[in-house]
Amino acid sequence: MKILLYNPDNGVTRNFMPHLWMFLLQALTPPGHEVVLIDGNAQPIDEAGIARYIREHNIELVGIGAMTRMIAKAYRMADAARAAGAKVVMGGPHVTELPDEALGRDGGKRHADAVALGEADATWPRIVEDAARGTLQDVYAPVDDTGKERKPSLQAYPVIPWDKIKLDQFNLLPAFMQPLLKRVGDGWGTFRIVPMESGRGCPYGCEFCTVTGFFGDSIRFRSNESVVNELLLLKARAREERGQIAVFFIDDNFAINVKRTKSLLRDIIAANAQVHWVAQISANLLRDEELVDLIAASGGKWIFIGMESIDPANLADVKKGFNKPSEYAAVLERLAQRNVYAITSFIFGMDNDTTGVAERTLEQIRSWPPGLPIFGLLTPLPSTPLYKRLEAAGRLTRVKHWQEFIPFAMAHTPLKMSIEEAHNEVRIGWVNSYSPEAIEKAVDSLNQKPLGYRINILIARLCFRGIYFPQMGRFAWLRIALENRRTISKLIKQGFGGGLHAPAAPAAVQTAGD
Ligand code: B12
Ligand code: SF4
């Protein structure tokens, strides 16, 4: 049977990194079937396009995975795939939370023939075999014979054949420059950011987050050996194609078990399996100096920290009181001393936020080492405790906000300001962090560092700017380069002045961030 796995585009940014679920399910597919992948962020495709693809390639089964913000597009593509004659199975966080919506059991249209609930590592092979036999069920749940929920152990993790997988759609460098770039340094013919998991689960249960509900509060890890081998496979591929690879450890909290993380990082160093990497780690776990030393020595370059707010009352409201704003500065200094920088994520529109929250937050950010601040709005994702609280209080203004997704728009009313005011705070955060002046200041603040670090922060800021300000296409990039010409020419002059030391990290690694 020919199977297509498809992930819809998010409509805002191009893909900087493929989605892990597609490679994982491909690796877990029983032998005898052919699996092709289309990531809409890398290969944009519409309803007519998917229908044509299905007919031309005789696709019999289409697997679609999507987050809540992409679900409307996912349903439209599922409808088109079914109309073209393929069976459709949907999985991922949104349909796990609302399976009846995908199956048309809530009074709406049916979009999927089957839904895979939760982690599908064990159910996927069964889904494929059932589809091949023509006996696809409506719902596949990760349960044992007695009906008890069974989370996959990651101890027997499949080998994802990174040395053989076709990754053409995931090169971040333009194809026409490849022959030339291959000859630069160790080779820059390709540059890929690859997702990798070392463990699953987070016990913290923050009110707005789906992770604890989805993956459970029992944390499971892969063996160090399997992670190290995967890194070695990726390193070998990069060498072979004279390109660069960076890894995004997508674990929700990469250091949730500090002892185990240290042991993994030591094994990575011992096996010489270092690549540049990014990971998400909560601020409270970065108090540990030895951990931060190992992060730097094992290739860690950027740490994503969900700071959310500088107001302890807000953090307590969303059950994230373990974040201590008073230690944010020390944590960031500790990282910066080892040339590791942070992607700092903030949420506005929380219940204790009042107008001026953006400026108060920016004031703090300006006193920290330079990083990549990002700003979002409190969003009630289905099935989260936050959604239930706001629904019970009658505060949801767009009950099914995902049916008509609008980027950076609230779906409920904050307590101490209006929705428009909250939107304005987010705008202030982005404008002030990504204006040419702010970017120049961030680059200048690294004047004591080798030029490579300053180039990295410049490219990273320009890429991250695109999360809020639409900048897809060549002309948009040209305009941004013009706006930032002062900073760019300063760096060029310094480069010719002989200040260029070994670059710190592959620049595009900085486009990561949840
Ligand atoms: C990596 C990641 C990202 C990447 C996404 C790009 C990428 N290439 O991966 C980045 C950093 C860009 C990102 C951004 C955002 N993210 Co994010 N992200 C993650 C993260 C940490 C890991 C995803 C992952 O690979 N998991 C590991 C794989 C193995 O798990 P999985 O994807 O769930 O797949 C399993 C099952 O779901 C199932 N499955 C999945 N798809 C399918 C399809 C089929 C057919 C089948 C059968 C099964 C199946 O099988 C898989 C194996 O068991 C998750 C949290 C998490 N731990 O999953 C959040 C998560 C997916 N993100 C989330 C959110 C909210 C966001 C943002 C909206 C945040 C924000 N406020 O801006 C943005 C949106 C970005 C955008 N513009 O699209 C939420 C989504 C919740 C929801 N209901 O939609 C999550 C769950 C985290 C959370 N806090 O709740 N994110
Ligand atoms: S926000 Fe982060 S720390 Fe909180 S439950 Fe989600 S993954 Fe865990």
Image (spheres, helix red, strand yellow):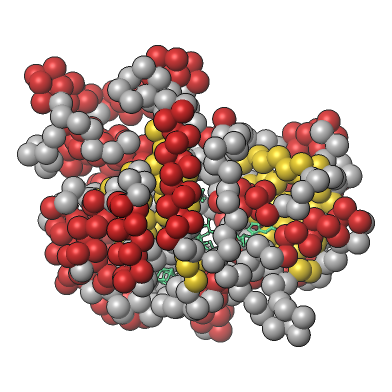
Image height check: is 246 above or below 119?
A: above
Nearest the eye: 379 or 260: 260
Q: Residue at x 79, y 45 (%)?
A: 33
x then y, percent, for residue 127 = 79, 60
Q: Quadrant of ligand 2?
A: bottom left
Q: Residue furthest right?
A: 134
Image height check: is 144 above or below 461?
A: below
Nearest the eye: 129 or 216: 129
**In this rendering, position of residue 349 left or right of residue 48:** left
- Residue 312 in which image quadrant: bottom left
x then y, percent, for residue 442 = 18, 42
Identify the image quadrant of the N terminus: top right
Residue 496: in sight, yes or no?
yes
Q: Residue furthest front?
A: 270
Image height check: is 220 above or below 7?
A: below
Nearest the eye: 427 or 12: 12
Q: Residue at x 44, y 78 (%)?
A: 203
Q: Residue at x 27, y 56 (%)?
A: 295
Residue 109: in sight, yes or no?
no
**In this rendering, position of residue 51 left or right of residue 254:** right
